[in-house]
Structures are given as C-alpha cells and as structure tokens.
C-alpha cells in the first residue's frame, strides 16, 4: 500500500539513478510503527532489481540486536540477494553460486577479507590473523557495547567494503536494511565504515528506522543516520483524502466513500496504513453477500458504533503492538486490565516498566492508532488484547492489578472485577472488597454480578463467621432475583443468628425475608432476638420502630402476636424517608385520608424519584400504597408510570414484580381491568412458587377481583384452586384475598360463603385497627349479600357505618357507599343518591364503579318512567363499561352475546345446529330481544330493559321466529344455548 508515497518513491528512484553514476548515496526512511516504511523499502528494492541492480537486503530484529554481525551476516553472504536481468524477475539468493549471480559475484560474497599474516590498518592499529587490536575504549565509545568475541570491526568492515567494491565494478548495488534501529552494534559500525567511503562506488544504502524504545541505541546509529550526506524521508500517517482514495481502489466497498465513514476510519486508526487496510478489508468482507458481520465476531460492546471491527482489524492492532517490542506488549496487557483506572504509576507497577518508558510507549501507541491516551480506542480492541494474555499469566496479572488498585484506594466496584477474573484469593482485604462491590452492584440493579461477587466471596472466606455473613447477603440477593425460591436461604440462617454468629446489622434483613415467605414463627424469633442483651449494643429505637411500622402495615396479625411491644419513636420531617413513608401508610390505614400522611407520601416519592430503585424500593412502595388507600388514584397512577419507566428492566426481578403488583392494584381501582390482569399476571410469574408469599397472594387477589369484574368467573375460579395457608390471613394481602374471593362468590350466587368472607375480613380489620373503607370495602360486600338474602335492615346498617367512616376525602370509597345505599332506598330516593355517588366516583378516577352507578341510575330512571334519561344513561354506562373491559356489565346493559348452539340430541342434532346458524343471521336488535326472551323476560320487561315499546318487541320477535323457522319461545330456547354465567 503506497498511498501518498509516490513522491517519496520517485525521490528514492532519483537517488538510485544518481548513485548508479558513481555518486554513492545513503537514504533513511523514518516514521512510526506500521506507517509503511517496509512497503516503501520493498518497492525501492523491486524497482532497482527490475533495472538490473544487484540488491542485498537485511532485517534488524529485536531478538538479535545483541548478536554480533547479525545484520552483516545476512548481507554477506547469508541473506536475500535480489538481482533480475532486464528480461526476468528478481530471484532470492541465500548464498554463493545462486542462479542469476555470476561466479565473480558469488566469490566476492564468500570472501571474508581475512589473511594469515599481520597487516597495517593505516590508523595505528594492526590485524593479526584477523584479530583487530584497536583499543576496547575506542570500540566502546562508538558502539556502546563490549568488544565482540569473534572478529574485529575494522577488519570485517574492510572485508565488507572490499566485497562491495568488487560487486559495484560489475553492477549498481543497492543495500537495504529494514528496522536498522534493531541492528547489532558491530554491523552498524561496519555499515558506517562503508557509508564513509561511498565515492566513487556505484552504491546506494537505504535504511528504515523507527524509534528505539526498550533501551538507548548505540551512538553509532545516530552517526550513521544523520551524516551530512544522508537523504532523510519521514512518512506521515494517512490523511482523510488518502483514506478516501484508498477506499476507492478496486475491490473496495463503496460504503467507505461517505465523509462520515472516512472520518470514522481516521479517528479509529489515526491514519495508520496497516489498520486502515484491515478496516477496509473488513468493510469489503462485510459487504459481500452472505458474509458474516465482523461486528458479530466477539465485539459485542461496540455493536452499533459504526464501522465493524472484527478479527482482521484486531490482529492488525496486535501486530502493531508486538512490533514495538515486549515492553509494549506488557504495557498493552496492563492497560487492557486496568482500563479506566490506568495511570502511569499503576501501569508501571503492574507491567514492571519504568514510568518514563510507560509514557513514551503510550505516546507511540497513540500515534499509531492503538490507543487514545491510556485507553484503547474500542472496547473490542481491549478485549482482543485481553484474550491474548496467556492463561497462566492472566490470573496472576489480575490478582496483582486488584491488589495495586486496592492499595491505591480504588473503590470496590473497580477492584472486584479483577478478582472475578482471577479466582479465589484468601487475603484479608479481599472479602470486604467483594461484599462492598456486591452491595454497590445491587444498588445498580446488576443482580447477576452481585451473585458472582458473593459466590467468589464465599470461596475466599477463611472461617465460619465470614461464610455466615456472606450467606446473609446471598440470601437477600436471591430474594430479589428469585423471590419464590428464596425461602430456604433465610430458613438456613435462623440457627446461626440465634447462636450469635450472625452480624447484628443483617438481622432485620433476615426477618423481612422470613415475613415475606409467611414464616412468621421464625420471623418472630428473629425480631424478638433484636431485644436481647447480645444485640443491645447496636440496636436503636429507630430501627425497631421501623420494624413495628412494617408489621403494622404489612403483617398486622404478626404484630399482635409479639410477646412484648417494640419501642416507638416520634416521626418528624427530619426522620429517615423510609421511616416517614411507613409511618404515613400506617396512619392512613388507621385514620383514612389523612392530609399530613398524604403530603408525606408525595414528598418521599419526589425525594427518591431519581435515586437507584434498589435503595428506595421499600419507601416508594409504602408511599404509593399510602396514595392508593387515600383514594388518590390519579396521583398514584401517575407515580406508577413514572417509576416504572424509570426502573425499566434495570431493577431486580422481585423489585419489578412487586412494582407490577402495585401498578395492578392502581389499574384495578381505576377501572383498567385488562391492564390490571396483565400486570398481576406478569408479577405472579415471578412471585409464584411452591410456597406462598405475601406479594404473590396480593397478585392473586387482584386477578380474582379483576376477572370477576370482567365477568370471567372461570378465570377467577382458577386462581382460587390452591389451598391457602392460614398465615396469609395475618397480613394485609390476606384482607385483599378475602374480599376478592367474596366478590367472586357473590357474583356466582354463593351468597352465604361470600358473606362469611366479608365478615371475616371486617373482623380482622377491626381487631387490627386498620378499618378504613379504602383498604377493602367489606361492609359494602356484606350489605349486598344481606340484601340478596332479604335482610335489608342489616344491609342498611352496614352501609350507614361505611358512610360514617368514608368522609369526603375518600371519594371513591364514599361514592361506592352511596351507590350501595341507593340500593336499599326507595325508587324515588335513588336518583339523587346516585347522582352524588356519580360525582364522587368521576372525580376519583374509578371508571368501573362509575359505570356501575350509571347502570343503577339508568334503572332508577326506568322505574320512574323517564325512558329517555334511562336510555341515555344506559348508553353512557355501556361505553364506560366497554372501555373497562367489563363485559358482564355490558351484557347486562345491552345483551349482544353470541349464543352457542344447543347441545345436539340423537333426534335433533342437525336442527339445533341449523338454529344456531339462523340465529347468527339476526340483526343486533333482533338478537338482543331474542336473548332476553330466551331467558323468560316478558315483552314488557324486554321493552323496559331495552328502552323500546312493547310493540317494537313484538315486531322483533315475529321476525326472529320467521328467520329461525320456529313458532314460540319454547322453540327459541331449544334453538339457542344460554350460558348461565352470561345471563342478564
């Protein structure tokens, strides 16, 4: 690749022409690693060989830099000899007598220039049998190294010069040395000797050289390269125009032509030709039909970041690093490990390289496009370097990196990843680092990483006390990751806690996990252990009061089983937000819509909105529940949407599931029944397991109540098939379960069983002093059951009690109470009461209850003979019920359900099917009349229900009989099948 090198190549060719006329010349090509020096040198050699010149080439090697005469040995005679006749190509030569080399040339190359006697050197020194007797001081001054063991520089230099002189008598001679900075000092001394005696030889010396990094080069190298007669050519990185020109070469993909992509190539490679070539090659491969995207080849972190960087590019980067020598490789490995934590001092200590050399290497690696300062330009490139580290070295390097970072004061989140990659390390500082990193990862909702940290921490423990502490932390994480299966982790820690082997500050977390899984006996033992003398040195009234509030709000039946009361403290605006949120919830459950508690809940939500969910989950949920039980449904709904969007997929599964439960409860009370089912189902998928837990029970209760409101009684019944543990009825979630089951039983005509559930619910709420109408309206359910059983006195008493508790602050609860009150009042009284209920329910955002009140109001107008109002109100009720997915209510308001064909009999199966087909051809109006007629409604009742005249009913029935080819209602009932669950 010789883009932007044409002018330099022509200048070098002119230099060859000049030297061929006997004006010997020296040229030095410099530039960063992989800049194209070797490619240019090869082009010069090929052009010279093509014109009949004799070319001798050598390569300086880092590994052979201390081998005396290593480079000279490649030239005379054991190196490539390229000479092509004008008619044929150049061929390599590895010794004398090679084709295309005359015998005289071969003999010249085989001559060592030695003689058997002494000879005068002409400068006061003597050669005896090939041994140079010049003082060692003179040698050391030029070469910076000790006197070579075999041969002496002046004698060998003279011999080399003699060979060159012989060759130039027959040919123009070009000698090239690539990477001359790696040449051994003895060879450099000889090359300088030749360079000082160029005229009148037909000779050109062309060298390439880069910066010497690992060690200071011999001073003779500077003398060789910076002589007055040396022509110097410095190669610069490719420019944007150069890259665009290269991209347009034959075989390149056209996608690199856009200025943005060319700019990205330049930014990613710094104009390094080797890297540009590799990147364009990957673009070409990427554009071929059926080719894999190089971005899929282990470069996931960079996916979507423009240009693909795959295996070819990564190998080119590694090649650039290796060309700079082993120190550069060690430094690259260290940078890849330390990543964002890299500093000159840390890199020096980890790699064992002098800090000054570290800085020089970073500058060079940046210049050639590998680094951007002490960072790799792509995450995928860093990964490629990491993968190159030998397995045996990787663990040791990571351990050292972790230790160095820890000693430098790096945070646990920076140190711990290195420990993960290295395996167990049983040193005193390791365990605290892993535990702290696990805590921080949990705050960031990176539960997978938390598990990995704690599993490694368990392997690093040196005693049982440490293992127990890790197990507590592990149990808490499993609770958040797989809540339904985490009970065993908490149960296993009870014995260590009671034996005093559990850290005191983990005790409350253990108790909360046991409470969640309804393991109340164990939880009580743990909580009461907080007050023993062993724990007295750490517990505080605030922590114990927080525990009391948790029990009062979530597990009130457990609180009353405590053998002694937990201490309380005064909660104020300066108290921790978690304590204030729990206090607000308990206050609302005990007092109803308390304005101070509502304001506190909103303040807590606002203060935690932008903080990590794992740190604020408990207080957020308490604040949200406070708004729900204060009938602030619109505010609760808004906060649910904001918090759900903020959490997204970043929270732990348990956190998302519990949040879904709260969202489902809000949706249920706002009349978004389908959404409530969806949210509760999603939550239950995470929370359900072989053992009941409090959040899973809440999700079941929401599903039962929502399905019942939608009229899907079979779906509700399926949720009630599992046996319920009695411990559930010591919780607030158990109250929701009892009420939801009661609603289902009432809707399926199991009135006595429904009444039992409602009364049980009321008994518990009164005993626990949380008898607020907005928790669950058990009195309204019981009143409806008593009314169906004919006891209007009991129904009226319960409704009036509910109204006394539901003040105007509880708008939804008071509206529902007024609706039930209207059902036990006279027809003339109902419209006024229902209008008041409607106003409250509309203001509260409870759409399902609003539809129910409108349906009742339509019926009240119908009884009073105001059919126009009844019809308008019914249609309004139907639209709202439809938006709530309350199909049962829609059917009651306007029957449109498609019937099923009657069960076929041996005698009349075909007739039944035919009847079903004809029924399907009826108009909507005819179908509604037919449905009600089949359920034994009279023509007058049908007219009242559908707000039409009796004459219209008779006309519709006549058309129904004709289309279905039947004569009366008995045949109509036989022709269609009405599911009792759909009966109006």
Image (tube, rainbow, N blue to C red):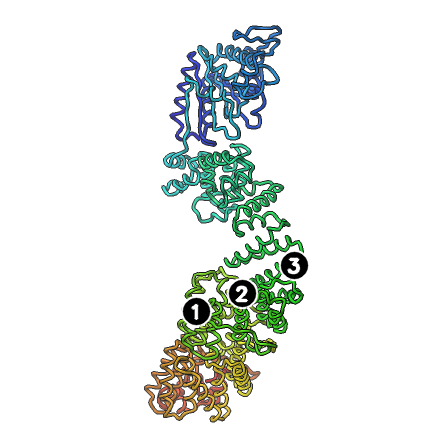
Q: Residues within 10 Å of mark 2 (few under 14, many from 20)?
A: many
Q: Mark 2 vs mark 1: which is more N-terminal?
A: 1
Q: CA distance from mark 3 to mark 1?
A: 39 Å
The answer to whether residue 913 is left or right of residue 826 is right
Q: Nearer the viewer, residue 904 or 786?
A: 786
Q: Is residue 312 above or below residue 427?
A: above
The answer to whether residue 36 is left or right of residue 461 is left
The quadrant holding residue 667 is bottom left
Q: Mark 3 vs mark 1: which is more N-terminal?
A: 3
Q: Residues within 10 Å of mark 3 (few under 14, many from 20)?
A: some
Q: Nearer the viewer, residue 144 or 89?
A: 144
Q: Could you say where residue 778 lies in the image, as x and y percent from the top left?
A: 49, 83
Q: Nearer the viewer, residue 902 or 351?
A: 351
Tell me the tag on residue 465: 3
Q: Where does label 1 land, which residue?
A: 573
Instruction: Name the element at disc 1.
Output: loop
Q: Mark 2, mark 1: which one is toward the viewer? A: 1
Q: Where does label 2 land, which residue?
A: 654
Specify the quadrant that holds the N terminus.
top left
């Amino acid at each position: 690749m010789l883009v932007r090198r044409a002018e330099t190549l022509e200048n070098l060719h002119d230099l060859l022409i000049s030297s061929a006329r006997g004006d010997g010349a020296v040229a030095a090509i410099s530039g960063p690693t992989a800049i194209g020096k070797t490619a240019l040198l090869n082009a010069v050699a090929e052009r010279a060989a093509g014109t009949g010149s004799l070319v001798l080439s050598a390569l300086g090697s880092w590994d052979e830099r201390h081998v005396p005469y290593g480079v000279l040995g490649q030239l005379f005679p054991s190196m490539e000899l390229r000479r092509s006749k004008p008619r044929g190509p150049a061929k390599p030569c590895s010794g004398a007598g090679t084709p295309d080399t005359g015998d005289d040339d071969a003999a010249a190359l085989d001559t060592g220039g030695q003689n058997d006697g002494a000879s005068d050197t002409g400068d006061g020194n003597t050669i005896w049998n090939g041994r140079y007797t010049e003082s060692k001081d003179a040698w050391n001054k030029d070469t910076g190294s000790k006197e070579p063991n075999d041969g002496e520089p002046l004698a060998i230099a003279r011999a080399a010069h003699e060979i060159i002189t012989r060759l130039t008598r027959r040919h123009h001679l070009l000698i090239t040395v690539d990477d001359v900075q790696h040449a051994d000092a003895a060879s450099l001394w000889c090359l300088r000797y030749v360079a000082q005696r160029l005229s009148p030889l037909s000779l050109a010396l062309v060298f390439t050289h880069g910066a010497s990094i690992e060690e200071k080069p011999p001073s003779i190298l500077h003398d060789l390269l910076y002589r007055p007669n040396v022509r110097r050519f410095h190669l610069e990185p490719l420019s944007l125009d150069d890259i665009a020109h290269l991209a347009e070469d034959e075989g390149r993909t056209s996608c690199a032509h856009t200025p943005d992509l060319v700019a990205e190539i330049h930014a990613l490679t710094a104009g390094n030709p080797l890297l540009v070539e590799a990147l364009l090659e990957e673009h070409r491969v990427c554009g071929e039909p059926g080719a894999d995207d190089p971005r899929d080849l282990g470069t996931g972190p960079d996916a979507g970041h423009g240009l693909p960087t795959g295996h070819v590019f990564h190998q080119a980067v590694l090649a650039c690093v290796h060309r700079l020598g082993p120190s550069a490789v060690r430094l690259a490995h260290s940078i890849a490990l330390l990543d964002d934590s890299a500093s000159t001092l840390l890199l020096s200590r980890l790699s064992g390289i002098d800090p000054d050399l570290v800085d020089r290497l970073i500058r060079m690696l940046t210049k050639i496009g590998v680094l951007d300062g002490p960072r790799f330009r792509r995450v995928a490139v860093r990964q490629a370097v990491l993968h190159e580290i030998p397995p045996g070295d990787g663990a040791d390097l990571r351990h050292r990196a972790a230790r160095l970072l820890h000693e430098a004061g790096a945070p646990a989140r920076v140190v711990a990843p290195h420990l993960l990659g290295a395996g167990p390390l049983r040193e005193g500082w390791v365990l605290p680092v892993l535990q702290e990193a696990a805590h921080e990862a949990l705050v960031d909702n990176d539960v997978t990483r938390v598990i990995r940290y704690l599993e490694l921490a368990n392997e690093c423990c040196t005693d049982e006390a440490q293992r127990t502490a890790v197990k507590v932390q592990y149990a808490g994480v499993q609770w958040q990751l797989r809540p339904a299966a985490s009970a065993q982790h908490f149960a296993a820690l009870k014995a260590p806690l009671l034996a005093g082997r559990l850290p005191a500050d983990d005790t409350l977390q253990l108790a909360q996990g046991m409470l969640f899984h309804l393991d109340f006996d164990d939880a009580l033992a743990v909580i009461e252990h907080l007050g023993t003398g062993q724990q007295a040195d750490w517990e505080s009234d605030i922590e114990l009061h927080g525990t009391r509030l948790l029990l009062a709000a979530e597990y009130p039946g457990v609180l009353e089983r405590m053998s002694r009361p937990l201490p309380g403290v005064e909660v104020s605006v300066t108290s921790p937000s978690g304590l204030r949120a729990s206090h607000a919830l308990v206050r609302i459950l005990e007092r109803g819509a308390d304005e101070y508690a509502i304001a506190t809940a909103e303040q807590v939500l606002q203060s935690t909105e932008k903080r990590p969910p794992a740190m604020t989950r408990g207080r957020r949920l308490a604040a949200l529940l406070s708004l729900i039980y204060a009938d602030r449904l619109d505010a609760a709904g808004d906060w649910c949407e904001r918090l759900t969007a903020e959490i997204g997929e970043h929270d732990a599964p348990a956190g998302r599931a519990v949040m879904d439960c709260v969202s489902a409860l809000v949706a249920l009370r706002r009349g978004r029944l389908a959404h409530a089912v969806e949210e509760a189902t999603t939550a239950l998928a995470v929370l359900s397991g072989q053992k009941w837990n409090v959040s899973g029970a809440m999700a079941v209760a929401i599903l039962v109540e929502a399905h019942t409101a939608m009229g899907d009684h079979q779906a509700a019944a399926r949720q009630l098939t599992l046996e319920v543990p009695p411990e559930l009825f010591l919780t607030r979630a158990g109250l929701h379960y009892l009420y939801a089951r009661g609603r289902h039983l009432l809707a399926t005509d199991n009135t006595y069983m429904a009444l039992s559930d409602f009364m049980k619910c009321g008994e518990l709420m009164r005993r626990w002093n949380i008898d607020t109408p907005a928790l669950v309206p058990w009195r309204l359910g019981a009143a409806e059951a008593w009314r169906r059983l004919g006891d209007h006195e009991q129904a009226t008493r319960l409704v009036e009690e509910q109204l006394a508790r539901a003040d105007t602050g509880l708008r939804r609860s008071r509206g529902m109470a007024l609706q039930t009150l209207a059902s036990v009042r006279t027809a003339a009284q109902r419209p006024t009461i229902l209008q008041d209920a409607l106003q409250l329910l509309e203001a509260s955002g409870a759409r399902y209850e609003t539809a129910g009140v409108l349906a009742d109001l339509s019926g009240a107008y119908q009884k009073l003979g105001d059919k126009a109002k009844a019809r308008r109100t019914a249609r309004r009720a139907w639209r709202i019920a439809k938006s709530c997915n309350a199909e049962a209510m829609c059917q009651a308001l306007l029957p449109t359900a498609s019937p099923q064909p009657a069960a076929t009999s041996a005698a009349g199966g075909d007739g039944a099917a035919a009847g079903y087909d004809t029924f399907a051809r009826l108009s909507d109006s005819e179908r509604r009349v037919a449905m009600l007629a089949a359920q034994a409604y009279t023509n007058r009742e049908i007219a009242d229900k559908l707000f039409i005249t009796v004459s219209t009913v008779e006309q519709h029935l006549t058309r129904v009989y004709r289309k279905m080819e039947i004569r009366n209602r008995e045949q109509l009932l036989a022709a269609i099948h009405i599911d009792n669950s759909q009966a109006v």
